[in-house]
Amino acid sequence: MYRIDFNKLRFLICDDNPHMRRILRTLLHSFGAREAYEAEDGATALEMYSHYVPDIVITDWSMPIFDGLELAQMIRQPESKGNPYAPIIMLTGHSEKRRVTVARDAGVTEFLAKPISAKGLYQRILNVVANPRPFIKTKTYFGPDRRRNTTNAYIGPERRVGGEVEVMQQPSLLDKARTPV
Amino acid sequence: MKKQKPETIEVKSFGDHHVITQPNPLRKVLVRVPESDLDDPVARAEKALEGLSGEFKNWMTIEADRLSAAHAAIVRDGFTNENREELFRAAHDIKGDAATFGFPSAGAAAESLCRIIEHAPDIDQVPAELIKHHINAIQAIVRERTKLDTATTASKLSKQLRGVADEFLVKVNRDRPEHLEAILAPSIVPAE
């Protein structure tokens, strides 16, 4: 049986609602986390993301000016100086299926619809820690593989075309990202 | 900052996409524990949340008052982009928070209001009474929770509001299939 050592994880919380930030902070601390930085808007979160290099980002969607979706899109810039691979958990009051798709297409790793529960949050964190997905880069998308279902039962057009051309090794972007600003 | 050593990322290139696999940078935080381990972080967190619950009524009142203030600004100045967004955000926050704070019916009424703001083709054409009833219902649910029969009444009230709002939205969106689809689609969150 595996458990997460939250003590070694650094979180960035982004939510404009102070009550929700307090709840998130309470939950993370009681899981055992010590480092949870908080931002009340997307722009501040992006700055803190570069500065603190969190392991996991938990963000609300609906915020004034610079929302959580834009934050996810800014983080998922493959050529950026920061770490574009950090897991992003979108915690939102939006509860429509089409919103899940939009979030997924912005590079969000996990979607958690409010009302928040300790169990739901723990499971999302466990999932990003224990089962990271490979990243896909296309002309229009950079983010975690959106194909979660690995069975061969899919029926429909093959949207990824082209045979494998090469496998190359490159230095970790994480290394670059972890360089102090 | 972390002390992790840099590791390599494997990039497989295909015709129109790359598949990038990196060694799991978070694997070190996964700790193997014996099956007999009794520590339950979720139960611990639920207990901590319970410890906060004494503040929930006050928080909910603050959220409901914010919604009323946003509505008052609209009554005073008419709809502007700014006050429309503030009304939506205030309702949206209640939609997300209210069940956690012990006011699920207020959350349901707030969700109904969010749907009106999001899907009405012209917010100025939404009957003012429809919006006002939502605001008043949320305020009433929050203020009157302590009464014994409140939970059932609150649930009935929010369901009725949702019914009226949906009827209005279906009517005004009959020529907007993408909105109609969104209005009629089931929520991914189980109903109250």
Image (cartoon, helix red, strand yellow):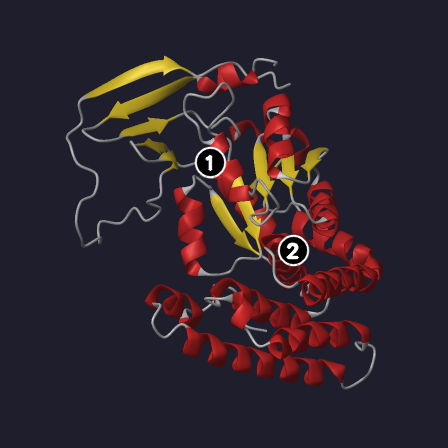
Q: Nearer the viewer, residue B186 or B43?
A: B186
Q: Residues within 10 Å of mark 2 (few under 14, many from 20)?
A: many
Q: Amino acid at mark 2?
A: Glu
Q: Nearer the viewer, residue B98 or A174?
A: B98
Q: Residue at x 48, y 68 (%)?
A: B120
Q: Residue at x 57, y 53 (%)?
A: A92
Q: Amino acid at mark 1?
A: Gln
Q: Which mark is residue B86?
A: 2
Q: Which mark is residue B138?
A: none
Q: Position of residue B147 (x, y in %)?
A: 82, 82
Q: Position of residue A146 (x, y in %)?
A: 35, 43
Closer to the eye: label 2 or 1: 2
**Image quadrant for the N terminus of chain B?**
top right
Residue at mark 2 shares a chain with residue at mark 1: no
User: On screen, B86 above or below A144?
Assistant: below
Q: Is residue A90 visible?
A: yes
Q: Residues within 10 Å of mark 1 (few under 14, many from 20)?
A: some
